[in-house]
Amino acid sequence: MDNQNQNISMNITNLIPTQLIQNLVDNYRSNQLEVINESLNMEDAHSIWFDLPTLKSFIAEIETQAQLIDQNVKDEDLGIRFYYAAYPQVPEMSVPTDYANRHTLVMIPTKKKDNLDYDFNPLEDTNGALAITGLITDALAMNHGTLVPPKTSIVETY
């Protein structure tokens, strides 16, 4: 399939000019990332990668858990909020030690109510409440992709 025909079959809202992508990445690297690197005296991560099966599995788990609580929930009422986060000085569990202090993302399910997208933990949402109380020690969430750096940037385009 040639490029022109491929673009026709894509959802036009999912297309971003490559120059805009490069400008956005350059803006981050020359502003926020530069300040972070200088103030923390380190080379922080500037990208994170997740494989497609892992992302699909997380989305499927959000859908499954939301359906268990509310059988009438619609796909358009569910989402994912990406929180910027940083690993601690001494990473926990299975996190590599070279991820210490680096940027990461934490993905939290959201559920729409009254046209607002609330953080949503189906492990706590037994009565339809959306506010996360923190009374449950675990949340449906996702973290720990592959950070660049410390992994190689040779695979990146931007």
Image: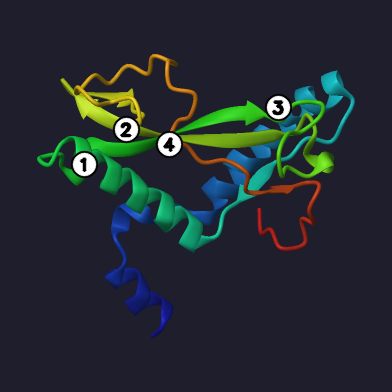
Q: How busy is the neighbourhood of tag 4: few (under 14 within 10 Å), some, or many (20 plus)?
A: some
Q: Is residue 143 above or below residue 88?
A: below
Which residue lies at the image location 56% right of the left edge and 51% below the top edge? 19
Label 4 to label 1: alpha-carbon separation? 14 Å
Is the C-beta separation of discs 1 and 2 under 8 Å? yes
Closer to the chain start, of discs 1 and 2, is 1
Closer to the chain start, of discs 3 and 2, is 3
Is the C-beta separation of discs 2 and 4 under 8 Å? yes
Q: Amino acid at mark 1?
A: Leu
Residue topped by disc 2: 122
Q: Amino acid at mark 3?
A: Asn
Q: Amino acid at mark 2?
A: Pro
Along the horizontal axis of the image, is 98 left or right of 61? right
SS for callout 3: helix
Which residue lies at the image location 49% right of the left edge and 61% below the top edge? 52
Residue topped by disc 4: 140
Q: Position of residue 17 (x, y in %)?
A: 47, 54
Front in this rendered view, residue 97 or 117: 97
